[in-house]
Structures are given as C-alpha cells and as structure tokens.
C-alpha cells in the first residue's frame, strides 16, 4: 500500500477579508508555455473560510465521492500507475492524507456513492463496487458492470454520473460535434442525427447488470455536454450544468464578430425532468439578451428567438467557463446561506469576465435559485487572467462534501485535491 505524506501550507491574509492558501504544482509537458518552476497560487475565499492541500500528485483528478468514514475516492481521466480510481485516507485524522490506494484499470470521470455502492464510469461504461459497513470497497479488483457500449468518440468523452433514490443512474453522453454542422460548412443538419445517441442524459437501472446502450432510456435531450451533474435530494430531481457551443463568426461574420464568439453563448444550469429538451443544437441561451436565440445554422441571425418548447435555464453563467463539477451542499459546517445551495467548479475562463478557474456558488431556497451566483473560491489559475504572465497552475474539475461538511475541490491539471473549511471567529 502506497503512503504519501503531504505538507500543507496555509497563509492567512487580512487583505479584503480573504484567507488564501498557497499551493505549488508542476506544469504538465503539454502546457504552454513550458516551465520548470511554477509560482505559488493563492486561493481566495470569503472571510472565515480556509483551504488546505490534501495531495498534489494524482494527475488527471476528475470527479470525487466521499464515503461515510471520510475516505475520498477520486476518478482519474488518465491512468496513474495503471489505476483509474484512487482512495485517499487520513488514517489518524490529522488533516493529512497518509494513504493512497489505486484500483480500477480504466480512466474516466464519473464517480458517485449511493447507499451501499460506489459507482464509477469509464468513457464507455459504468461499474459498481459494493461497500462494507465502514464505507470501504470490498472487492476493488472485481467490479460489477452495469452498462457497456456507451457512445465513444474522439472528443468530449466524459460519462459523468448521478444516482437517484429510486435505483436509477443518470449518464451524460456528450455531442462530439460542436454545432451539428455538415462537415466544412455552416449548415446545420436537420434533424440533427446525433440526438438519437448523444447530447443528452441516459437513464439506466442500478440493480441490473450488463445493460447495453440500447437498454437505457433517453431521459433528456438537447444538452450538448453536461460534465457536471448532481441529484438534488431536496427537490428529488436532477440538475446539470452545460458546456455551451463555440464559434459563431466563422461562417456567419455578417451576424457575429469574434467578440460575440468569445462571449456567447451562456453556460447554463438546468433542472432536468424526464423528457426535458435543452434545445441544442437548434437554439442557444444568450445571457446578455436573456433569451433563447435561434442558432445561425438553423436560420438565426443573433436576434431571432426560438426553442419555445425547450427548457429555460435556472442559472446562466458567462460563456466558455466550462462547468465541470456540480454539488448541492447539505452540510452544516458552512454558514446558513450555503445550505442546500449549489457549488459549481469551472474548468476554464471567460473572456467577458477575464476570470476563470474558480468555484462559484448559487444560493437556493425552496428548490430554486434565490439570488445571483457569486465567486466563492478564486484564483486557482495562480495568474492574472487579464494579463497572463505564466501557465495556469490548477483547473477545478470535481466537487465533493466531507462527512464534517467541508468541501473538496479536485484539479485535473496536476492532481491537487483542496479541502475548504469554515471556522467562525
């Protein structure tokens, strides 16, 4: 069993009521520009909150799940030492991870704990592992296969998952075409053939093994890519956050400038019901006009509205922030305003805001957003995004809640896991 001892460094600042934590990490060889040393990055948090680093060497750490005994299970987008899931354990409860154990020979994104099972996804299937009374995986080398043969293409492969209270599991199957265009043209395919097998949420049974793709139910459609999803136990419904499409100006310069493409469309949060339609690729949501706009591939000009039968988002965020993680907070450690609200981990940046690589918070009341979204944890990038002078250090991806109510944030750039806690002064 591999043991890793991590040193956590916390720096307390009185400036602007923030408490930053300093973290270091190496830039992967694929990053630009290349750098042998990376400057420390200060994570900015509201007053009363502090952050620490649990580990820094996991690689492509995607989504996470936490068992009732506090073990953190991390799904990896790329194998580390041949393993795609790592269990992190603090054996003496001193706030330091001193045990890391890998299992599962498949990369992927999705991981979720419900009742007596740990569910995990590869890029083409879903597995489950039975847990013992302590919340530990009993047979890590013998997972049961729930689903196999999910659509797998070259882009947007993540099969994120969530589990409800009725033995159903929900799987994101993304579109592998940004706007459902005919190759080399700005003409949209009508109807979009991808909607039969992608760009939606598929529902499968958790208690039936060896299901095929065709055994699933297309629970919702018209959702381009919802890497972040969570089951809201207060509303008993599924919520998702969607990655918006790209480029408008390439084939439609008479309607859209490069600035439009940089600032549109919104990244969106939806409450999804059976039969819901997000409208992709026919319409997109413009958070500036606050309307569903007909896509140019289907006769739009940037002003024409459409999608009368498509869902309206419950929250709209600026373009290209890439929401990769969604978590409804049910703990009691954080102040009352955060309880039952939604945290969202953003994996990229917004040209409109000149900010990104952050965790946002959306307040909820009675199952609905009750106020504007706000930045909760900022500056994972470690650089000034308006005038960048170096490589990004961390990209938030997954979110999880500890038994004590603390919040975990994963970084899939270098494999850092952050813990955010609150202590009233």
Image (spheres, rainbow, N blue to C red):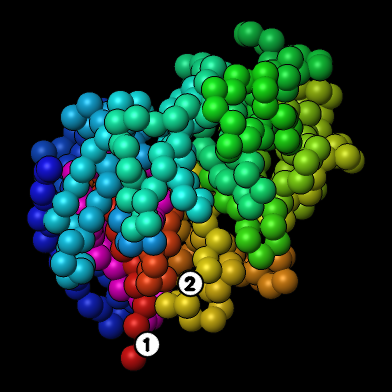
Residue 63 belongs to magenta span: yes
Q: Which residue is drawn at 77% across and 52% down?
A: 290
Q: Which residue is drawn at 47% across and 16% down?
A: 154
Would residue 188 appear left or right of 70 to someone viewing this image? right
Q: In which quarter of the image is residue 94?
A: bottom left
Residue 304 belongs to magenta span: no
Label 2 residue SS? loop
Q: Is residue 327 visible?
A: yes
Measure the alpha-carbon separation of dots 1 and 2.
15 Å
- Residue that sits furthest to the top in the current view: 183
Residue pointed to by mark 2: 331
Foreground residue among 288 and 98: 98
**Residue 89 position in % (x across, y down):** 23, 56
Residues at badges 1 and 2 in contact (C-beta under 8 Å)? Answer: no
Foreground residue among 238 and 138: 138
The residues colored magenta run 40-67
Name the image quarter holding the C terminus.
bottom left
Would residue 417 appear left or right of 372 to someone viewing this image? left
**Residue 69 position in % (x across, y down):** 33, 62
Foreground residue among 373 and 273: 273
Would residue 90 appear left or right of 151 to someone viewing this image? left
**Residue 136 position in % (x across, y down):** 32, 50
Count the labels in the image.
2
Callout 2: 10 Å neighbours few (<14), some, many (20+)?
Answer: some
Q: Is residue 354 visible?
A: no
**Residue 117 position in % (x across, y down):** 46, 46
Residue pointed to by mark 1: 424
Q: Residue at x 80, y 37 (%)?
A: 275
Q: Quadrant of residue 279?
A: top right
Q: In this view, does 194 lie above or below 230?
A: above
């Amino acid at each position: 069993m591999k043991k890793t001892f991590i040193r956590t460094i916390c720096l307390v600042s009185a400036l602007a009521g923030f408490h930053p934590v300093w973290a270091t990490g190496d830039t992967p060889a694929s990053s630009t520009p290349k750098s042998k040393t990376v400057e420390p990055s200060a994570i900015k948090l509201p007053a009363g909150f502090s952050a620490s680093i649990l580990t820094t060497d996991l690689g492509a750490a995607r989504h996470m799940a936490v068992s009732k005994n506090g073990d953190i299970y991390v799904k990896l987008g790329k194998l580390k030492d041949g393993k795609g899931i790592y269990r992190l354990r603090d054996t003496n409860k001193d706030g330091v991870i001193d045990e890391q154990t890998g299992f599962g020979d498949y990369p992927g994104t999705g991981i979720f704990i419900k009742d007596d099972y740990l569910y995990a996804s590869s890029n083409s299937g879903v597995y489950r592992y039975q847990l013992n009374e302590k919340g530990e995986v009993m047979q890590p080398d013998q997972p049961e296969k729930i689903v196999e043969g999910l659509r797998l293409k070259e882009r947007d492969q993540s099969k994120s998952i969530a589990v409800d209270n009725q033995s159903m599991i929900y799987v994101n199957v993304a579109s592998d075409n940004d706007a459902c265009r005919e190759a080399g043209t700005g003409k949209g395919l009508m109807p979009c053939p991808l909607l039969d097998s992608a760009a939606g949420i598929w529902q499968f049974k958790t208690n039936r093994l060896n299901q095929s793709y065709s055994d699933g139910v297309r629970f919702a459609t018209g959702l381009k890519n919802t890497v972040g999803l969570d089951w809201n136990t207060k509303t008993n419904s599924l919520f998702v956050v969607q990655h918006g499409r790209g480029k408008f100006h390439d084939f439609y310069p008479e309607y859209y400038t490069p600035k439009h493409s940089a600032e549109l469309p919104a990244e969106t949060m939806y409450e999804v019901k059976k039969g819901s339609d997000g409208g992709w690729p026919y319409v997109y949501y413009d958070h500036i006009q606050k309307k569903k706009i007909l896509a140019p591939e289907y006769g739009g000009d940037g002003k024409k509205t459409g999608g009368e039968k498509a869902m309206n988002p419950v929250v709209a965020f600026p373009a290209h922030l890439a929401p990769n993680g969604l978590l409804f907070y049910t703990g009691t450690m954080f102040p009352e305003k955060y309880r039952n609200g939604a945290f969202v981990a953003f994996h990229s940046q917004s040209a409109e805001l000149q900010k990104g690589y952050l965790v946002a918070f959306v307040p909820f009341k009675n199952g609905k957003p009750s106020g504007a979204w706000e930045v909760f944890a900022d500056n994972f990038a470690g650089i000034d995004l308006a005038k960048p002078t170096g490589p990004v250090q961390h990209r938030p991806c997954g979110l999880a809640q500890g038994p004590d109510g603390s919040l975990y944030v994963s970084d899939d750039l270098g494999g850092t896991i952050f813990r955010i806690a609150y202590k009233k002064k």
